[in-house]
Structure formats: structure tokens, C-alpha cells
Amino acid sequence: MTTKGTSEQPLNTGRDRSYSAYDRWLAEQDVPIQTGYYVEDAREIKRGWWALRGCPAAILNLKGHEGVTEAHVLEIPPGETIPPFRMAIEDVVYVMEGQGICTVWAEGHPKVSFEWQKHSLFRIPTNYYYQLSNARGGSSALTLHISYLPLAMTTNSNPKYIFDNPFVDTGELYGDESGFYAHEARAVKRANGGTEWYGNFFPDLTVWDKLEAYGGDGRWAMGGGLTFPNSSHRPGLMVLPSRRYRGAHRHGLGVTIIGIQEAKGLVLMWPPEGGPDDVIETPWQEGSVFVPPNMWYHQHINTGGTENRQLRLFPPRPIMNYSMYDPRQYVPFVEEETWVKEKFEADLAKNGLTSLMPDEAFTNPDFKFPADFLTKD
Ligand SMILES: [Fe+2]
């Protein structure tokens, strides 16, 4: 098995057809661009002044973003407020460090402010101005932003359309009587009996306790049911309990996955036709970001003594390839290569822990996971 790290590769400046409007725009940005398959800790990557945002920043253009989604980090210096910004697509913001105020408004309309903290998640609707302020005088705040900018630039390649577009649906922020950025999410029952929680502001994802089991056939985890109402973005909070792992699966590109709490673990990912030498091992800790490339297998492994929480921001649903028939969407544990479980157990042992995976799951194709699989200790 080999491990491939990250690198700051030069952008393609040639004339090949894969060179997109987003790539052209990116080449003009005066900001560090991080490429590769993952970043170990997005709080630690090199940042530099970004004129577009008027603050230090770094763009993540990882292999799995592949022209559909993007992520970037903004640094708000101690006690400062960065310039107002708007764009003609939604902006999803996750707070990696710090505490501050976000002020959102449409031109000629009242400003709406709310206070965010480390582990907050919120959504800025299309073409609303917003401004971020750091409420602390002694340390920088770091925010991670996720958007469909590369995809949007394939439908209209003029950056002015994206960054200088006056259209605003004022009904979004001002038409919500319960408060667009209300701290309390609203419960909405799904047809299958589960619950979705509607909100545009989730103050702290690490204490979110409205969790329900989901998955099946060795892919069990707890999910948070987070939903941005009337949004093109679908967030997901996944909680994987200690000393367990999920079977490998694959889908379309563009899912940005962020480790949001102190934890120990790893993610394995490999191309569909790949062998053991093609496996990329991604550390999974707070601040880790990885994006599985198109149809690459990946699996989440928790080798620590605490639960692992991760936030996922999905691309538009058709890009996930859910509707495509894929007989190999999942790798059953009975067909898994034996080194995966061996590595899991060896990493657990380094942490003084032992596996809570049932041995029979790896030998009996008809094995049914017990109801307490996710909760037993
Ligand atoms: Fe996945």
C-alpha cells in the first residue's frame, strides 16, 4: 500500500479541453491553491492574501472536486471585519476556529446578524451581502466555505455574473417569520419515519444530539438529519462510533468531507479498478478534508476511543450517480481484502483498544448486525 500526500501542483495552463472556466478564473486568483487528494488539517494549510475577499485565504481544489464543487478557507484576523461579499450562488460556511458575528443583508434592506462559534454551520443565500467579524482580539478565526462555483461557471463563465449580480430574492431572508437564522432547527418528518431538521444556522455540530442510525449491511452510522430548506446544498452530519468501521462504497464526485472533532481514524480510498498499491490513506482528525474522486471506493475507519464526527457537503444529487445501477456500489465485508481489517486492528492496538466489529460479519454473507451495534461499548 502506498500513501500519496498533498502537493501544490501548478495549474494546467495548456489548451487541453479539461481546462474549464473555473480553471481560468482560478489561475487569476492571487491566493495559495491546495491540490491533491486530501488535506490533513485545513486549519494548517498555507494561506495568503486574497484580493477578492480582502483577507488571508487558501483555496482547496482537490482531485475529487473535479470541476463541480470547491472549498476555501478564510482567515479573519483578530478583532477585524472582512469586506462585504456576495455571489450568485449559495455559500455554505463551517467555522473551524474562533467566534464572531455574521451580518447578512440585501441592498436597501435591514441587516440581520447572528453570532457564530467554532463548529457552527450556516448558509448564505444567493446574492445576499454578508460580512464576517472576528469577536476575539487575541486570535484569528478560520471559516471553511463550500460552493458550486466550478459548476456555476460551466453554465455562465463570466465572473461578473457570479460576483456582480444584483438579483436578490428578498423573500428568502426577510420572508421567514420564524427567523432565517433561528438557533432552533425545525423538525420535519420524512415519509420513512425519520426526522429532518430544517435550519440555516446550526450553532455547534459537535453537540448536535438528534441522531438516528442509518445505513445497513455493514454501513451503519448515526446521522444528524441536517437540512437547509429551499437550498441546492445538502449537508450531512455522520457520527461513527469508536472502534468500528464502515464497509467501502462509491458514488459520484464532489462530496467535501470535513473532520469536525478531535478524533483518531483514517479513510481509505482507491480507484474502481485499483489494487492495494493504489490505496490512498487519509488521516481522519479534526480539520481533515477529503473529497473522494468520481466512483472511487472509500471507507471510514474509527480507530480511536471517541466517536468520529464528520460534516459532508454533497454536490447536486444527479452527480452522485444514485440513480445509476451499480452492482458494486458497496463492498460487503465478506469480500473485503483482509488487510483492511488487519490494519484497523493494528491501529486500534496502537491506541490500546480492541475492535467492536463482529468477526462473523467477515465470514457469513447472511450476517445481520445486532440492534445495539452502534451503541454498545
Ligand atoms: Fe461516500
Image (cartoon, rainbow, N blue to C red):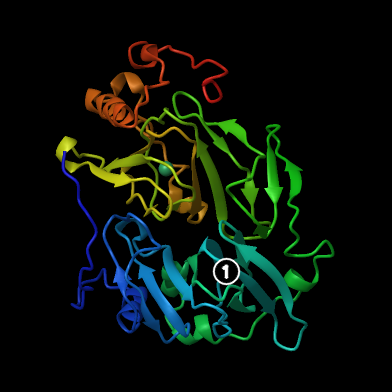
The N terminus: image quadrant: top left
Q: Residue sitting at 51 percent across and 63 percent down?
A: 97
Q: Inspect the image, locate mark 1, and give the three-letter code of the amino acid beneath it.
A: Glu
Q: Which residue is mark 1?
A: 90
The outermost residue toward the front is 138
Closest to the observer, 29 or 3: 3
Q: Is residue 131 above or below residue 265?
A: below
Query: What percent of the width, then of the height, locates residue 32?
Result: 31, 75
For disc 1, the neighbor class at 10 Å (few under 14, some 14 to 19, many from 20) is: many
Left or right? Give the position of 206 relative to 157: right
Q: Residue sitting at 76 percent across and 60 percent down?
A: 182
Quadrant in the rendering for residue 164: bottom right
Quadrant in the rendering for residue 168: bottom right
Q: Check disc 1 and report its element: helix, strand or loop.
A: loop
Quadrant in the rendering for residue 296: top left
Q: Residue sitting at 68 percent across and 44 percent down?
A: 196
Q: Quadrant of ligand 1?
A: top left
Left or right? Give the position of 200 relative to 82: right
Query: What percent of the width, then of the height, locates residue 229?
Result: 68, 56
The outermost residue toward the right is 177
Check mark 1 vs ligand 1: CB closer than 8 Å? yes or no. Answer: no
Q: Is residue 12 above or below residue 300?
A: below
Query: What percent of the width, then of the height, locates residue 260?
Result: 49, 50
Q: Residue sitting at 29 percent across and 22 percent down?
A: 335
Query: What percent of the width, then of the height, locates residue 50?
Result: 40, 82
| Number of residue marks | 1
Q: Is residue 89 above or below residue 271?
A: below
Closest to the observer, 251 or 199: 199
Closest to the observer, 363 or 203: 203
